[in-house]
Amino acid sequence: MKLFAQLLSDLDETNKTNQRLHALVNYFEKATDKDKVWVIYILSGKKIKRQVNHTQLRTWAMEISAIPQWLFEESYHSVGDLSELIALLLPPPENASDFTLHQWIKQIEAASKTDEQERRKFLLNAWNSLQSTERFAFNKLITGGFRIGVSQKMIINALSQLTGISSAIIAHRISGNWHPDDIDFQQLIFEDRIHTDISQPYPFYLAYAIEGEPAQLGDASDWQSEWKWDGIRGQLIFRNNEIFLWSRGEELVTDKFPEYQILKNQLKEDIVLDGEIICFNDGHPLPFQLLQTRIGRKNINAKILREAPVVFICYDVLELNREDIRKKPLQERRKILDDLQQQFSNHSVLKFSPVIQFDNWNALTEIRKLSRENFSEGIMLKQKNSEYKVGRKKGDWWKWKVDPYSVDAVLVYAQKGHGRRADLYTDYTFAAWDMENKLVVFAKAYSGLTDKEIREVDNFVKRNTLEKFGPVRTVTPQLVFEIGFEGIALSARHKSGIALRFPRILRWRKDKKIEEANTIEDLKTLLPK
């Protein structure tokens, strides 16, 4: 555990890529193979089951620390991270432990199967044998929460540097549905599993937002254009007469979308398709908010299937008859898709993203203006001779989204952030005017301001607090901000009657008074017709 705790500390102390990369490589060089596999699993974002709930954790930590609840809560709002707070508050350990990471994980899993009294005993003994940095790592393990700002790309690069294997191959090998209990480091990194694990996906190729005008990309005839659909990026796999569906976040979501099982009888050869999971009815896509009603559900019933029917709009093919074809030029892969399309009717759950025909960049600029009318977020631009790469790469694929919706809103609540921003008010709630000239909350946002602006707003919040509700402060309505968002839908759950998609701060409107902010009715005029 000491080595793992040191890794977390090293990663937290710097935001420089090279230093973080060095810390990861250094860890992989020293750790046992079993610990390496667990670190790859944990830091690449795969889910760890929470073994102790937060209420128990808080209660037992307060008992051992001998501090009252009010002080614990105030300390939490200042520190911003429960695992870190507990590690700081606990008295010095009386014992020592040399257990490695995977040994602690096995003990945690065993303790989770006992009753509450035994779990408490295990937890207190563990805390009493770990130093502060180790306690932090231990607390993260038992709560199942690892958000430390290390990208999967960085882990892949560290493993590539360690082994000499290309990052593209590493990315493919650590993707998919695997668990450290079932595979060792040698099998994971040095062996291909695609023939033994028929569900294994490929890493997704991601596009950057275009910088400037598309004319700078060169000859328009070298580029393929498609609509950018507003759904969940997915990879649909058909191998050995089995269907598997992966989200971009590497979550196997096959069971959440039973509609795709019919493709077992329709697809004639093993294939892996890249595309969009999207709600669809009456010949066109439906709002993303409808798809959200299915994402968090454990059980998909007939009512949900009727109200939020899905299709898979495919726009690339990555594998055909067990052959990896990602290195073939896009126009060749597109020809395979076009041939596949001939096998399916317009009523199939498998749709095909049409290629937009355009003669020049000016013509495509005009077509892009029709994005929302075509139920899309904008346009994708892909070089016709491009390979299907790994991760986010510049050059061959670009997304050219339409400008976001925007309104002016009034800041009414503020809350402190987490981690490095735990001492600053960075999470904001905004309101617009209703018909009775009252401010009604409609959105929350925490991104879009510069560090200087954040400090200014933080100072304003502290000087203009009207009420406190735990970590939240009600502030004097005085500041106006322009809020951007990607979509809007009716919502019975919100007092405003609407819900926004991806709200964020576009700019601080210091030139506007609160009376000039938009109204709820203004927002409702933006609802899809």
Image (cartoon, rainbow, N blue to C red):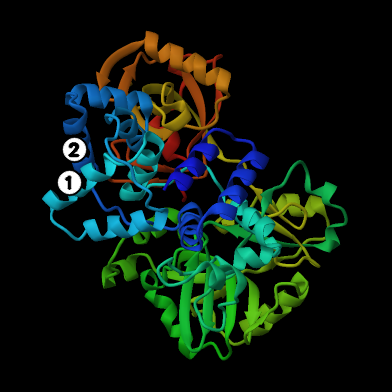
Q: Residue furthest right?
A: 219
Q: How many marks?
A: 2
Q: Is residue 378 visible?
A: no
Q: CA distance from mark 2 to mark 1?
A: 7 Å
Q: Is residue 7 in sight in this rendering?
A: yes
User: What residue is shown at x 31% (from left), y 66% (from top)?
Assistant: 304
For residue 388, side relative to residue 527 (left or right): right
Front one among 36 and 435: 36
Q: Is 126 situated above or below 352?
A: above
Task: Give the image location of residue 206, x and y in percent.
Answer: 64, 57
Give x and y (percent) for residue 502.
48, 42
* Residue drawn at 40 percent across, 15 percent down: 461
Q: Under tag 2, what secondary structure?
A: helix
- 500 shown above or below 506: below
The residue under label 1 is 120
Q: Is residue 81 left or right of residue 152?
A: left
* Among numbered discs 2 and 1, the one appearing first in the sequence: 2
The residue positioned 33% from the left and 70% from the top of the image is: 306
Question: Label 2 belongs to which residue?
Answer: 60
Query: CB under 8 Å between callouts 2 and 1?
Result: yes
The amino acid type found where label 1 is placed reads Arg
- Residue 188 x/y as whole percent: 54, 69
Q: Amino acid at mark 2?
A: Trp
Residue reaching furthest to the top: 463
- Say which element carries label 1: helix
Pointer 1 local density, CA inside 10 Å: few below 14, some 14–19, many at least 20:
some
